[in-house]
């Protein structure tokens, strides 16, 4: 599967995780409890959410450049 598809899948997983654990964290904060595990999970999913697509796009660009270099005729000099 292409890196951009993996990036999109990880982006969606991160989005659902940030929303889910963020809402659970907000509800527990309103109830007067603080959970370090929820905070860490929310940040981990946030990092996955924010960086999955840019990294996938960078990998796609690197693959495209490598493919283009392979097709270009070699110059003799």
Image: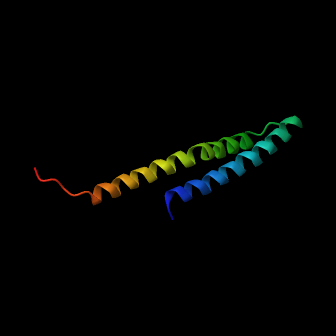
In the displayed structure image, the side of residue 43 where residue 60 appears, left or right: left
In the displayed structure image, the side of residue 74 where residue 67 appears, left or right: right
Q: State which quadrant residue 74 falls in.
A: bottom left
Q: Residue furthest right?
A: 31
Query: At x 71% / y 45%, what residue is drawn?
Result: 18
In the displayed structure image, the side of residue 34 where residue 8 appears, left or right: left
Number of numbered discs visible in the structure rendering:
0
Q: Nearer the viewer, residue 55 or 34?
A: 55
x, y (%) of residue 23?
A: 80, 43
Query: At x 53% / y 45%, what residue is drawn?
Result: 54
x, y (%) of residue 26?
A: 82, 39
Q: State which quadrant residue 44 falls in.
A: top right
Picture layout, residue 2 above or below residue 35: below
x, y (%) of residue 9?
A: 61, 57
**Type of colouring:** rainbow
Q: Residue furthest left?
A: 77
Picture layout, residue 46 above or below residue 66: above
Q: Nearer the viewer, residue 71 or 8?
A: 71
Query: At x 39% / y 51%, what residue is drawn?
Result: 62
Q: State which quadrant residue 22 falls in.
A: top right
Picture layout, residue 30 above or below residue 2: above
Query: At x 36% / y 52%, what residue is drawn?
Result: 65
């Amino acid at each position: 599967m292409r890196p951009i598809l993996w990036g999109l899948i990880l982006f969606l997983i991160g989005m659902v995780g940030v929303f889910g654990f963020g809402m659970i964290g907000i509800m527990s904060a309103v109830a007067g409890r603080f959970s370090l595990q929820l905070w860490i999970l929310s940040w981990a999913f946030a990092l996955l959410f924010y960086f999955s697509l840019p990294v996938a796009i960078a990998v796609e660009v690197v693959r495209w450049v490598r493919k283009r270099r392979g097709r270009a005729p070699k110059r003799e000099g």
